[in-house]
């Protein structure tokens, strides 16, 4: 977001991805590495354990881009990723956080 | 009922026992501080033969050689730090060519991780992008889950490399074992979608000018025979990728040979004319497709792959089917009509006659093509052929009569110079009854030359054919063709005496340059058992042709 104004940033179509993952050291590296090695920026990340902590949920906000379909397929292939769900950019998980980023 | 027998074993002993239970009988590696407990346990194994490589990259490629000829998961080992970093190239190579490999590395004790301890490197972090999956093991107990899982993951679906990093204190940790996990085996692949299969069959039945495009997945799936029968039933001319060579005998009536950058003119011209491309276990690699927008411009595409992320990755398929190639062929074949396709096959014959693969010098064993042909004439289809990377690799891919799946070992995706010799060693370890011939160049051989010692120590039936053009030939060729003949850093000014080098390692040798009757000399050299270097000088100006410039369309070929 550094190089683009907030208004311009919002003009880019966004997608929110919701991932269920195993909760152990290294899983976040596997997930974000999939994006970074393709120079595909992740705009927002949230991660918290779910239930007893064996599983975590990762929320990613990414720009819509021609590579997104391929990205989702690659993320689904990761051994520690149990499920991937796609949401529209209006998903409230990031909207509610905005007050912490003012 | 008797109570289960309980044993107290260390993590290292558990690893060795799990490898034995997995059926591993040969593995390759190099010991070092952080993996010594496993080596100590390995010394007590009556079942596992450890092959001591002379560089960890060699160990990785030896394991790859075993995996490529057998189709089974093969194991390599290295210590922490430089041992692990030296393995990386062989692991990345296995990832790109979908080879089932298990790499086990020692790591500094858990209490020292993150302290910049001696020979500490973040092996886990380094191997994330080049493995299917990796593990940093946290306890001896975890090994009981991780090792069988590693085998399962390496073998399942699209095969690939898995790394298990084991801290030294975990190797030394003793626990009580009363029950062993089942060995890890490949997961079953879900059945392909019946509706998509029916659509694919209809497209094949309606096509006038179809081409079958066979990739490495056909070999991995042990589907070569089915693929050939399928092609024969529906009269489908067939191209092979570099990885698929041998899947259909190259002299089969329907074989169009290798496609792409160094494919024959008629092969690439026919792809330009086809109205249906049926891809089995192929990934539309840029060396195969050339400029993607210009690849098979008139064709509908059916793409079958076990890895769903390959579908629509490079080229959007009209029908994309996720499934095991063998299972798909079994279900698709009965739905496809027997056709003669006389107009299309006569067009194939016409273009083949007009634009054949030209192999100048094929009758002269002192030329690249002639040498390859003369060697092939001394061998039968039981021989295994490995290559390094460069001009010699492409000449062999074009000219060697490959007729058997798993006969052909080459570094396709990563294109790793130094692959050939250790891969040949692995092939000879896995199938000692075969003659294994490694074609190499004077550039490539020096990249893992230390493995001459391993082959001599194991007394393996490996023949290295060194095509010596005193240069990095493919670089020389590209500088000649695309960089205004500005030859730079591709011509060797110093040249080792390769005969003396090989003799120094305890190899038998033949210098073809000195032979009065090269064909007879080759016959003798290839029939002697044991490691043998065959050295042959090649003219530096020899080129691999035709050639598609990187990024250009396949129909714009240079030469040939």
Image (spheres, rainbow, N blue to C red):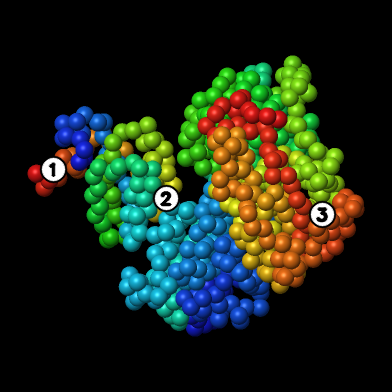
Host chain of mark 1: A
Residue B165 lies left or right of residue B411; in this view the side is: left
**Vertical placement of residue B385 versus B306, above or below:** below
Q: Which-is-in-front pick, marks 3 and 1?
A: 3
Q: Could you tell me which quadrant the N terminus of chain B lies in? A: bottom right
Q: Nearer the viewer, residue B63 or B137?
A: B63
Expressed as whole percent of the image width and height from the top left, the position of residue A34 reads: 38, 47
Q: Nearer the viewer, residue B532 or B247?
A: B532
Q: Which residue is mark 1?
A: A98
- How crowded is the residue under tag 3: few (<14 C-alpha within 10 Å), some, or many (20+)? many
Q: Which residue is mark 3?
A: B512
Please tell me which residue is depicted at 55% across the width and 57% down the height of the picture: B90
Host chain of mark 2: A
Please tell me which residue is depicted at 71% across the width and 66% down the height of the picture: B501
Q: Which residue is mark 2?
A: A78
Expressed as whole percent of the image width and height from the top left, the position of residue B519 reads: 88, 50
What is the spatial separation of the Cα atoms under label 1 and label 2, in whole angstroms?
30 Å
Instruction: Give the SS element for disc 3.
Output: helix
Q: Could you tell me which quadrant the C terminus of chain B lies in? A: top right
**Vertical placement of residue A32 versus B495, above or below:** above
Which disc is residue B403 wearing?
none
Host chain of mark 3: B
Please tell me which residue is depicted at 66% across the width and 20% down the height of the picture: B209
Q: Which-is-in-front pick, marks 2 and 3?
A: 3
């Amino acid at each position: 977001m550094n190089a683009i104004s907030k208004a311009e940033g919002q003009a880019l179509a966004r997608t929110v991805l919701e991932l269920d993952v195993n909760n152990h050291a290294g899983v976040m590296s596997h997930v974000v590495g999939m994006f970074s090695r393709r120079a595909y920026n992740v705009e927002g990340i949230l991660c918290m354990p779910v239930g007893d902590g064996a599983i975590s949920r990762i929320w990613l906000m990414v720009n819509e881009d021609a590579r997104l379909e391929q990205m989702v397929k690659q993320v689904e292939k990761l051994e520690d990723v149990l499920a991937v769900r796609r949401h529209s950019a209006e998903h409230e998980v990031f909207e509610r956080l905005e007050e912490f980023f003012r | 009922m008797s109570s289960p027998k309980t044993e107290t074993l260390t993590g290292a002993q558990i690893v060795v026992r799990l490898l034995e239970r997995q059926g591993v009988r040969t593995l390759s590696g190099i010991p070092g501080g952080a993996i010594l407990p496993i080596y100590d346990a390995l010394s007590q194994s009556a079942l596992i033969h450890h092959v001591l490589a002379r560089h960890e990259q060699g160990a990785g490629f030896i394991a790859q050689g075993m995996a490529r000829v057998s189709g089974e998961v093969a194991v390599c080992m290295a210590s922490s730090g430089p041992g692990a970093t030296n393995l990386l190239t062989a692991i990345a190579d296995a990832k790109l060519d979908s080879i089932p490999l298990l790499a086990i590395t020692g790591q500094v004790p858990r209490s020292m991780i993150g302290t910049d301890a001696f020979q500490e490197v973040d092996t886990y972090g380094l191997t994330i992008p080049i493995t299917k999956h990796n593990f940093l093991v946290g306890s001896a107990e975890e090994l009981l889950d991780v090792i069988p899982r590693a085998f399962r993951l390496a073998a399942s679906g699209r095969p690939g490399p898995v790394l298990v990093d084991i801290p030294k204190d975990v190797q030394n940790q003793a626990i009580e074992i009363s029950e062993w996990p089942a060995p890890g085996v490949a997961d079953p692949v879900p059945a392909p979608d019946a509706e998509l299969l029916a659509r694919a069959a209809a497209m094949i039945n309606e096509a006038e000018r179809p081409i079958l495009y066979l990739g490495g997945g056909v070999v991995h799936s042990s589907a070569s025979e089915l693929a050939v029968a399928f092609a024969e039933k529906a009269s489908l001319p067939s191209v092979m990728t570099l990885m698929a060579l041998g899947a259909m005998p190259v002299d089969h009536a329907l074989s169009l040979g290798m496609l792409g950058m160094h494919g024959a003119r008629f092969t690439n011209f026919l792809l330009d004319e086809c109205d249906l491309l049926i891809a089995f276990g192929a990934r539309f690699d840029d060396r195969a497709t050339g400029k993607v927008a210009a690849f098979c411009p008139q064709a509908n595409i059916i793409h079958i792959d076990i890895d769903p992320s390959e579908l629509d990755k490079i080229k959007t398929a009209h029908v994309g089917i996720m499934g095991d190639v063998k299972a798909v062929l079994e279900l698709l074949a009965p739905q496809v009509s027997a056709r003669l396709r006389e107009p299309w096959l006569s067009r194939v014959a016409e273009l083949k006659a007009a634009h054949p693969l030209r192999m100048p010098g094929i009758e002269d064993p002192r030329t690249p093509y002639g040498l390859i042909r003369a060697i092939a004439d001394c061998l039968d289809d039981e021989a295994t052929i490995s290559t390094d990377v460069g001009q010699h690799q492409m000449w062999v891919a074009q000219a060697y009569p490959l007729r058997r799946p798993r006969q052909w070992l080459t570094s396709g995706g990563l294109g790793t110079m130094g692959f050939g010799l250790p891969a040949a060693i692995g092939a000879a370890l896995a199938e000692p009854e075969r003659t294994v011939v490694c074609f190499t160049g004077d550039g490539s051989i020096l990249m893992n030359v230390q493995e001459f010692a391993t082959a001599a120590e194991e007394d393996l039936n490996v023949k290295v054919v060194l095509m010596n053009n005193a240069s990095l030939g493919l670089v020389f060729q590209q500088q000649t063709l695309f960089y205004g003949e500005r030859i730079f850093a591709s011509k060797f000014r110093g040249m080792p005496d390769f005969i003396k080098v090989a003799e120094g390692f305890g190899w038998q040798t033949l210098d073809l340059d000195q032979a009065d009757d090269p064909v007879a000399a080759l016959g003798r050299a290839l029939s002697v058992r044991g490691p043998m270097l065959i050295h042959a000088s090649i003219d530096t100006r020899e080129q691999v042709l035709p050639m598609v410039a990187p990024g250009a369309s396949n129909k714009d070929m240079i030469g040939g």
